[in-house]
Amino acid sequence: MKRYVISSLALLLLSGVSLASSVYDYEYPIKNPLLATVIGTPIEFQAVLPKKIRRSVKSVVVFPDRVQPPFTPSKKMPFTLVSQKKKAAPLIFNIAGTGASHASPKMQMMEKALYQAGFHVVSLPSPTYFSFIMRASTQQVPGHIVQDSADLYRVMELIYEQIRDKVEVTEFYLTGYSLGGAQAAFVAKLDEERKLFNFKKVLMINPPVSLFNSVSILDKMLEDNIPGGPENFDAFFNDIMNRFSETYSHLDHVNFNDDFLYNIYKEGPQNPTEEELARVAALIGLSFRISSSNMIFMSDLATNDGYILPKNHVLTTTQTTTGYFKVAARISFTDYFNERFYPYFSAQERGLTRDELENELSLTSIADYLTTADKISVVHNEDDIILQPGEIDFFRTTFQSRAHIYPHGGHCGNMSYKDNVSYMINYFAN
């Protein structure tokens, strides 16, 4: 394994001088952040991980008295348990990124790496994933990072109660990628008050600074780059979905965020033109739109709000959802925020402004805690596409030497790169 040459850079920022770990001689091969986000890490550059591990899919019932709709009748929310054989070890809770399940490719990669290093792992779906919305979310209006993190904490507590007699745990750690990385910080802060786990270490991987800013970037990425302009959305959407159908005709289920992008693009050019890069940007935006559309649809189904489905409509497993899905696909997250999300939470908290709600959905709202929380570190990329210009400096300023920032890798594109995996393992193991 190659060595990092790590230097503490003195960065003169508005808040003063801060120190952050920056990586030199970094050989992750894809320099373009859009392509890195889509392609990920080529096989020859990936960490060597075991093919098989002690992995089992289990489930937890969070709301035994909740009446589930016929479309999703089960009350059980799946999660993954990876356990060391007859061995006491730390347990790492791992939170998936936006729209991803407990079994997404990124989660399975992390499970293998952490298992190989001697840890137990519990992998959790994102609170924006359908099974969490229907079976583990208190309000079933996902996207409020404080509320969603409280729901995650409750799920973690129930899972540990369920497995504690089967798995010998020495201490607890916490991690997550993308939105799951940001949620890890809020979960850790909640644990400071409740002290159920007393997390020893927390690692945030490629988190957004502001959820609202990041989803706005992804919305704009689609809207500004549709071939032929926004009025050509239907044709672009249908073209991608037709290719999707051909690619996945043999599969029962797909996680859009993890493998959808790569498999749709894998035949694309390795040195794309500006026009081709615009299509890549549109593809990334569409992937997020599909993920958020699923979230919005399931939330509407759960709450009977009438936002997508007709109010009081009983949807069954035999009915087609194509028409509803096409309606949801036209709704940006900004639309969802304005038309459903903000009205819902402002009704609960009189006088709540849009700006106040946006701030609640950001790491800046807990910056004071993060500045002093020595057990929390962050791994990020200088060119992450979900960050606004200058937002990467929030991590340098807030985390200082606890921020490990790679020069490139896009959004989570380098997660399985051998050096990134090595850093993650060393962080938890040492």
Image (tube, rainbow, N blue to C red):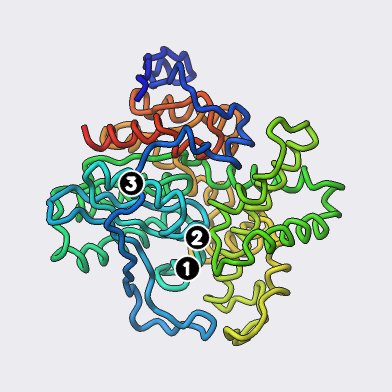
Q: Is residue 161 above or below residue 418?
A: below
Label 2 close to label 1 by CB (< 8 Å)? yes
- x, y percent for residue 240: 73, 56
For the N terminus, give its image quadrant: top left
- In what element is the residue under mark 2? loop
Disc 3 target residue = 50
Q: Nearer the viewer, mark 3 or mark 1?
A: 3
Q: Residue at x 21, y 48 (%)?
A: 172
- x, y percent for residue 121: 28, 53
Disc 1 target residue = 133
Say left or right for 212 vs 81.
right
Q: Residues within 10 Å of mark 1 (few under 14, many from 20)?
A: many
Question: Callout 1, which amino acid?
Answer: Ile
Q: Residues within 10 Å of mark 3 (few under 14, many from 20)?
A: few
Q: Residues within 10 Å of mark 2 (few under 14, many from 20)?
A: many
- x, y percent for residue 122: 30, 56
Query: Counting residues from the N terminus, which is met first, the one under dot 3 or under dot 2?
Result: 3
Q: Is residue 318 above or below residue 411?
A: below
Q: Residue at x 39, y 69 (%)?
A: 136
Question: Callout 2, which amino acid?
Answer: Thr
Q: Is residue 253 above or below residue 114?
A: below
Disc 2 target residue = 128
